[in-house]
Amino acid sequence: MLETQAMYPIANRGQSGERERFLLFELDTRGHHPGYIQHLVKYWCQHNLSGQLDVLVSPKFMQQHSNIVNLAKLSPTVRFVSITEEEDAELFNSFELGQSFRGRIVRAFQEWRLLRKYALSLGTTHIFVMYLDTILLRLGLRVSLPCSMSAIYFRPILHYGTFPNYSPEGKESVWQWRDRVCLARFLPVPNLQTLFCLDPFAAEYINQVYGTTKAAYLPDPVQRYSYADSEYEHLKARLGIQSNRTVFLLFGAMSRRKGASEVLDAIALLPPALCQRMTLLVVGPVEEPQHLEARIAELTRTKAIQVITEDTFVADEAIHPYFQISDVVLVPYQRHIGMSAILVRAAAAQKPVLASDFGLVGELTRHYHLGLAVDSTNPEEIAKGMTRYLLEIPSELCDPTLQKQFADRNTAEQFASQIFQCLQGAQARGNRGLVNSASDYSQFNN
């Protein structure tokens, strides 16, 4: 049964002696979004934190991620609340609108109205927005927050001009202008407590440019699990990976920006002798499966490469073995803005990456010597990188010490602990161990 706002009475806010009531807001059901909620709810239950934790999600989330919703049974102070089916149906799908500016504005207004409505009715004392980017346009219009608020700013691009060889393309200049204007209006709002960024360079840039201390770096959460060696061998056998082949892993939701087409174009450029030595392992839900299958069929007719696909969502606890059995992890995003947990997972498995040289992904790959960074929009450059990995020893093209440092900084435990320090009223700049900027972050490279 879905828990909806109508099932709860309107709360009286601000009464003395009442415990803190925190509200996590996340209406997206795809990709990393469910996992982030899972990390936070687990941490809350394991550490028996004080207060009430409400998690506001969509009806689809309640249906698709019942394993996460059921975590609320571990604590009487955790409750999942769903918006109604009618409210969900009225939401504009900005993806179906072609990422149009109008669609984003409509969605921003709709989500803000829902967030404000539920925060007031639930008696929330601190809102935590899991994905600020969706409603930033609305918040840039000078809103009155119903209570204290913090958020994760996922895809900052306004500082990309500080990265080497960056030149804006397409709508990137417009996005940079939009975010600069919105942040200039939103950051001074008194009830805004902390603006978290998974990009350490963005946190430092925002604080310097806007003269604030509200921006703070937030680790990207990758949960560690324990596995027996037999599990890795079982997975290799189940997949049918042929011996004496170098395994290149492309993992995650296979959307256009993932770079699968560019990878296939790159493999088509390789000589037959190299193709005989490689396996391409594609794991994750495919946006256009028929198109990908046709491309792979065409490639395998002319090249002696082994291609294995698993067009399915992989649960968090089952992800690491795919990285462990691979030799090289592909991260060929097409002008991706923001962080990628794929980098962290590869580093945790001590596997080198062949990554895009663009934006934060490129900067971290170079900074931590995680592997090779190339122009991922150019299949010829991807092919050159693949050739190096096939002709050289892959593990010698990265730095295992820096890989470990990078992976150790991005754990689910640190992600959740820093967020709840914020929610429970600690001042972000006074929190011991809280990493707030790129200058703080760089100490882990020493």
Image (spheres, grey):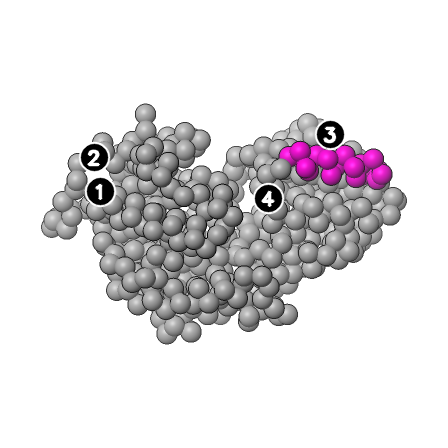
Q: How many marks can you see? A: 4
Which residue is painted at 36% across and 39% down in the image? 90
Disc 1: which residue = 122
Distance in Å between CA atoms under marks 2 and 4:
39 Å
Q: Residues within 10 Å of mark 4 (few under 14, many from 20)?
A: some
Residue 255 tag number: 4
Q: Amino acid at mark 4?
A: Ser
Q: Position of residue 231 (x, y in %)?
A: 63, 31
Q: Residues within 10 Å of mark 1 (few under 14, many from 20)?
A: many
First in sequence: mark 4 vs mark 3: 3
First in sequence: mark 4 vs mark 1: 1
First in sequence: mark 2 vs mark 3: 2
Disc 2: which residue = 8
Residue lying at the far top in this picture: please name it: 1
Q: Is residue 249 above or below residue 361?
A: above
Name the quarter where the N terminus is drawn.
Answer: top left
Disc 3: which residue = 240
Q: Foreground residue, 243 or 118?
A: 118
Q: Position of residue 179 (x, y in %)?
A: 43, 64
Determine whether, in the image, residue 293 is placed left or right of residue 225. Answer: right
- Can residue 50 be found in the magenta stretch? no
